[in-house]
Amino acid sequence: MYPDLIKHLRKNAACGNGKARATGFGIPVLGHFPKVFLDTYILKCKLQMTLQLLDTGTECSLRICIGRPCSGVRPLTIGHDDNVFLNGIAQQAIQKEIAKHNMLPPNVFSYQKGKGCGDATIIDSIVKEIALQNNNFYLAELSDDAEKMFDRLYMEIQLALLLLTGT
Amino acid sequence: MVNRANKLVTDLFVALMQYKCGLPQGSGFSVEIANLYAMLLLMWWNMDQINPNCNIAPFSSPRHGFPFIAGGVLMPISSLAYLDDAKHFIAVLKQTHTCAEFFKIVQGYCDLLADLSLVIKMGRNVKKCVLCLYNIPQTEPVPEFTSIAWSFDVQGPRYYKSCNSVQRLRR
């Protein structure tokens, strides 16, 4: 994971000016300082990844309400801190492991390599078409809509799901 | 997200909030967790809807899957998932089952889904939980499918009647 981390950090530090405010700073800011600053920052990140302990008190996120075309609003979370950056590195590693071990069944279509929402709708249409053409099966289609799914996934469920992956 | 300073920004106000649970939408990590939740849901659907002591069927040969044959390869289709949108197909051969038996199986799957909702306290939007039935003979009366699932609004179990849509056979 460290080569990835160092590569991403150096790439980030090299791009643009970045912003620094009283509440925090963007990683590109480190590109303006002598090299030792970035090296120290990388060391800190390595320690955090090794100990699996993120800094406390640095976390900050914005939930901005975006209007939906039908009705209501959808909150979009924007995070900008060290931990968001390190989480990004960690999630890439988890994603790679899940893909490598073929954990997800073939009928999960979201954000899988080579798959998309279109595949699900094509299969859905074909199943109904064949069922109606041949008429040799009773067929029921049960659609589930979990209410506020992203907001209701408790820590316990998240951990149980991660255990399923062997994380 | 725990111990995170959260700020809610709207057109009217800005508020500081305490984060209790959930996932930030838009993060790659959330996508993975949501996909794993989808996997859990599909695994749950692979249980026997009548006998809870039965094994969970593997994804390669699910119970009551629709036999989809393409290029000489048979693939039973039982469920499809895209993040929080999931659907389950229940296909039963007409030669081997009566319509009443089919309805009993469908009711079993409704109960199964409601049980998961109660266990993990994931509310269900009754307007968007739709049951569509295909190839039902014109003369066959369709029963009302009901279940007791977790409700986000009442923060407790609630009795639900499904929104049925029936595709009758006209031959």
Image: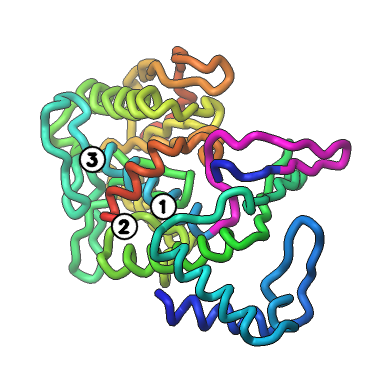
Label 2, label 1: how many angstroms apart (C-alpha)? 8 Å
Marks 2 and 1 close (CB-CB < 8 Å): yes
Do discs 3 and 1 share a chain?
yes
Q: Residue at x 29, y 29 (%)?
A: B109
Marks 3 and 1 close (CB-CB < 8 Å): no
Q: Is residue B138 visible?
A: no
| Magenta stretch secondary structure, dominant | loop
Marks 3 and 2 close (CB-CB < 8 Å): no
Q: Which residue is mark 2?
A: A104
Q: In the rendered structure, the residue with mark 1 lies on which chain?
A: B
**In the rendered view, how is the structure colored?**
rainbow
Q: Quadrant of residue B161?
A: top left
Q: Amino acid at mark 3?
A: Asn
Do discs 3 and 2 share a chain?
no
Q: Which mark is residue B46?
A: 3
Label 3, label 1: how many angstroms apart (C-alpha)? 17 Å
Q: Quadrant of residue A92?
A: bottom left
Q: Which mark is residue B99?
A: none
Q: Which residue is mark 1?
A: B35
In the rendered view of the protein, which quadrant contains the N terminus of chain A? bottom left
Q: Amino acid at mark 2?
A: Leu
